[in-house]
């Protein structure tokens, strides 16, 4: 049984919950898998710590709460400080590189993307969360790219579909290039 626990963290206003909804929808509706979603946020609507937890599985999910995430997506320094200790040993850590500084001793498998900068270059800082969804899809392959695209199209407002799909593609391509560079560097070592 393939089960992946995912935690997405950031601050209110970054679209953390929407990111998780898109991933969960991609898994459960468009990839024919099972998914659960739980969320938590501080008393502040914007600016406070916020997280969403997903479990994606090939089998029905019997316990909906994430205990030790296999994958963690963090979009703020506060989220890194607060949630990073929960990541299972050897887990996958995806960071917004301009907003999160990892500890030098962090031994997780870390991948970084300048999601905010890429979103700003596209004209809307608010789509950084969808850039992160694209990056997560490319690096973790927990959902299919096709499923994620369909989930975006069925979730975001109609007038923003094209922008959000472009944001997804930007993050996805960034991740694929990063993986391609990593595998090339790895193959040169052997």
Image: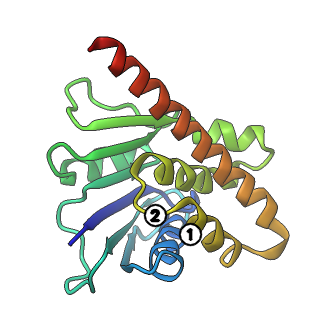
Side (left or right) of 182 relative to 98: left
- Figure check: 20 above or below 187: below
Residue at x 34%, y 19% (from the top left corner): 187
Q: Residue 147: which numbered mark, if any?
A: 1
Side (left or right) of 182 relative to 115: left
Side (left or right) of 113 relative to 91: right
Q: Residue 190: x percent and y percent?
A: 26, 14
Q: Residue 131: which numbered mark, if any?
A: none
Name the residue carrying label 2: 143
Secondary element under disc 2, as helix, strand or loop, is: loop
Q: Mark 1–mark 2 contact, CB under 8 Å?
A: yes
Side (left or right) of 13 relative to 190: right
Q: Quadrant of residue 185?
A: top left
Residue at x 56%, y 59% (from the top left corner): 145
Secondary element under disc 1, as helix, strand or loop, is: helix
Residue at x 43%, y 41% (from the top left corner): 95
């Amino acid at each position: 049984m393939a089960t992946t626990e995912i935690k997405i963290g950031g601050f209110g206003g970054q679209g953390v919950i929407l990111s998780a909804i898109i991933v969960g929808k991609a898994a459960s509706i468009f990839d024919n898998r099972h998914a659960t979603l739980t969320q938590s946020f501080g008393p502040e609507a914007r600016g406070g710590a916020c997280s969403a937890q997903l479990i994606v599985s090939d089998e029905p999910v019997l316990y909906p709460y994430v205990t030790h995430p296999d994958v963690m997506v963090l979009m703020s320094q506060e989220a890194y400080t607060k949630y990073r200790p929960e990541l299972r040993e050897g887990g996958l850590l995806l960071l917004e590189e301009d907003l999160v500084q990892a500890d030098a001793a962090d031994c997780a498998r870390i991948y970084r993307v300048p999601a905010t900068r890429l979103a700003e270059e596209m004209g809307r800082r608010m789509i950084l969360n969808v850039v992160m969804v694209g990056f997560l899809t490319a690096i973790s392959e927990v959902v299919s790219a096709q499923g994620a695209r369909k989930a975006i199209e069925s979730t975001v407002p109609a007038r923003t579909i094209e922008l959000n799909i472009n944001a997804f593609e930007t993050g996805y391509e960034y991740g694929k290039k990063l993986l391609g560079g990593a595998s090339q560097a790895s193959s040169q070592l052997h």
